[in-house]
Amino acid sequence: MAGSITGNGFDLQPSGEQVALPTNYITNFDFLSQYLPDTYEKEFERYGNRTISGFLRMVGAEMPTNSDMIKWAEQGRLHTKYVNVNADSVAAGTTGTFTVNDTDKPANIAIREGQTVFLTENTAASGLTNKAVVTGVTADTFTVAYYEAGGQAFAQNDTVTVMIYGSEFKKGTNGMEGSIEADDVIFDNKPIILKDKYAVNGSDMAQIGWIEVTTENGATGYLWYLKSEHETRLRFDDYLETAMIEAVPAATGSGAEAALSSASAAGTINAGSEGIFYAVENRGNVWSGGIPSTLADFDSIIGRLDKQGAIEENVLFVNREMSFDIDDMLAAQNSYGAGGTSYGLFDNDEQMALNLGFTGFRRGYDFYKSDWKYLNDPTMRGDLTNGVVNGLLVPAGSTTVYDQVLGKNAKRPFLHVRYRASETEDRRYKTWITGSAGGAMNSDLDAMEVHFLSERAVCTMGANNFFLFEG
């Protein structure tokens, strides 16, 4: 009778170190392969640091919210100017009537009887102006009496701009009629749910890999499935940021609206969210048609900033091309720079490194320049033919807004992320393991599944202070 051997055998188990143990030793039984290849055991990092996140951590903050909708109020202008006003009366009259046609005017214009106004013809070459006192007002028209003896300078149906600069009343008259309510603008945004997952079956987890792998978060080892899990986590971290940059609300009637809109206690919550680029394109300032590369270009930008919040310090997050163009523009201002070598480190000589770059400059405002990897990475915004973004100007500091949830004014960074959270559920960054491998024992699936989830939105406050530089 043939004999048999019984007892416990060896199980193939992975090891965190490259050592030959009874539990992980294997041999090559293919005797035809007598020449073994010469291999490098460590994976070569040919693309360097591949992650692109970090922008929002530099310029913003994160804070919780417990609602499907985030609302805040931003201050309107303190003073009033209308730029599309029709002159209804003929020239040379001592009085005149005007109709306000601005598309954003309120139901009743913010001009009151007794106020003094400055009127100027919109054609730059005309030089026609008047100053007058308002003698009557309706919903969208007003009448004036001119201070000039020559009366109205404008021809009938000319388009003029009107600016309020004060008031004047006769002795013994009643006070100002009516009042002007504070001009607050209400904005809102909604969080979106982001998910990702990595899965590896139990059999592959028991397979030894002899290549040492590493990831950007510092994890190293000889198990290839750990490499993929770490990269999934890093990829999800990047998407948490890029989704806040690129998100757009679903248009009415769009496929995304039908596929992703959901009901809540507050009503229907439409798909999508307002990312930074969308907010700046719709509520901020956009430079298009190339890169601002001359002082005249930046003077135009500064002129626009003067008309907005006039934030003293601003940061330019730019791609490589715009960074170099700014360097060249600043270098050209050096009167000794004909040879291109007299700027940079002081007392340059042949034994010193020549600094050909600039980190910032001041012209009316302070501008600090920083390379934005997201705009350079060829797997993201880099190397695009259409939809090119060369940079983003972000005001530094914080702004005061009325928080609808808190019910009071609050200091907030111009850019910040709100994530869903309550006392029992924090959805800032959730991760959990399911399956029956890798330590998880909560299902009969012969695999390990690592799940990632976050629910968040970005709030772009004071978008009128931002500049988006499009190609």
Image (spheres, rainbow, N blue to C red):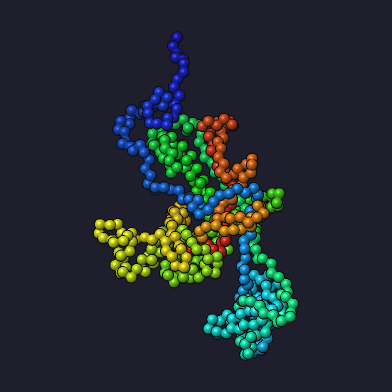
Please tell me whether residue 366 is drawn above or below residue 139 in the rendered image: above
| Residue 431 spot, x, y in % from top left | 55, 40
Residue that sits furthest to the front in the current view:
172
Please give the name of the residue rendered at 35% of the width and 37% of the height, measured from the top-left corner. 41
Q: Which quadrant would the N terminus be assigned to in this image?
A: top left
| Residue 76 spot, x, y in % from top left | 62, 65
Please give the name of the residue rendered at 58% of the width and 49% of the height, measured from the top-left corner. 63
| Residue 390 spot, x, y in % from top left | 46, 61
Please tell me whether residue 93 is drawn above or below residue 17 in the rendered image: below
Observer able to see residue 267? yes
Please tell me whether residue 293 is drawn above or below residue 352 in the rendered image: below
Residue nearer the viewer, 194 or 9: 194
Observer able to see residue 456? no
Residue nearer the viewer, 45 or 255: 45
Residue that sits furthest to the left in the current view:
350
Please give the name of the residue rendered at 57% of the width and 30% of the height, measured from the top-left corner. 441
Instruction: Please give left or right for residue 468 compared with residue 214 in the image.
Output: right
Please give the name of the residue rendered at 46% of the width and 50% of the height, measured from the top-left corner. 52
Residue 4's image quarter?
top left
Residue 332's image quarter?
bottom left
